[in-house]
Amino acid sequence: QVQLVESGGGLVQPGGSLRLSCAASISIFSCDVMAWYRQAPGKQRDLVAVITKSGTTNYADSVKGRFTISRDNAKNTVYLQMNSLEPEDTAVYYCHALHSRLGAYWGQGTQVTVSS
C-alpha cells in the first residue's frame, strides 16, 4: 500500500509564502508522475503542478511564476514552494502519485488558507 503524507499547510497573509511537502512510502523516482492538486470549498479538484520522472514540470496558468514543484529522490519527498500567495489560493492541497505498476494514489490533503 502506497502512502503519501502532506505537510506544511497553514494560515498565511496575502503575499506570503509556504512550502508544502509530500512524503511517499515508495521511491518517487519510480513514479511516472508526481503532482499537486487543490480543491477549494464547493469547487472541483484542480491540477496545480506536475513533475515527471524525467524532471519535466508543468503548472496551472493561475500559479505560473509563483509556485515551484520539485522533488528530492533521496528523501522520497515532493515539494511545492508557493510564493506571492493570494486569497484565491485558499484550498486543500493534495499530493498525487502515478505509478505504472502500482497505480494512482492520493494523500490526505493539507489546508492552505490565505487571509489577512
Image: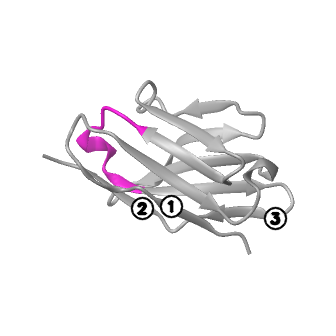
Identify whether 30 is placed above or below 83.
below
Which amino acid type is marked by label 1? Glu
Give the mark nearest the N terminus, 1 or 2. 1
Q: Amino acid at mark 3?
A: Leu
Q: Which residue is mark 3?
A: 102
Q: Is residue 85 magenta?
A: yes
Identify which residue, 18 or 88, lies in the foreground: 18
Q: Give the structural element (helix, strand or loop) at label 3.
A: loop
Measured Cα–Cα span from mark 3 to mark 1? 20 Å
Q: Using the numbered discs, state the Cα–Cα distance from disc 2 to disc 3 in whole angstroms.
A: 24 Å
Residue neighbourhood size for the residue with mark 2, other residues' Cα within 10 Å, grouped as few (<14), some (14–19), many (≥20): many
Report the residue marked by disc 2. Answer: 110
State yes or no: discs 1 and 2 in contact (Cβ < 8 Å). yes
CA gap between label 1 and label 2 equals 6 Å
Q: Quadrant of the N terminus?
A: bottom right
Q: Are marks 3 and 1 in contact (CB under 8 Å)?
A: no
* Residue 53: x %, y % from top left: 77, 40
> Which of the marked residues, 2 or 3, is nearer the chain's N terminus?
3
| Residue farthest along the bottom direction in this orientation | 1
The amino acid at mark 2 is Thr
Residue at the spot 81% in from the left edge and 51% down from the top edge:
30
Q: How is the image coloured?
A: one colour
Q: Secondary structure at mark 2?
A: strand
In this picture, which residue range is highlighted in magenta? Answer: 82-92
- In terms of image quadrants, where is residue 8? bottom left
Give the residue drawn at x 30%, y 32%. 84
The structure residue drawn at horizontal position 21% and vertical position 39%, both measured from the top left corner, is 14
* Residue farthest along the front direction in this orientation: 74
Q: Which residue is mark 1?
A: 6
Q: Secondary structure at mark 1?
A: strand
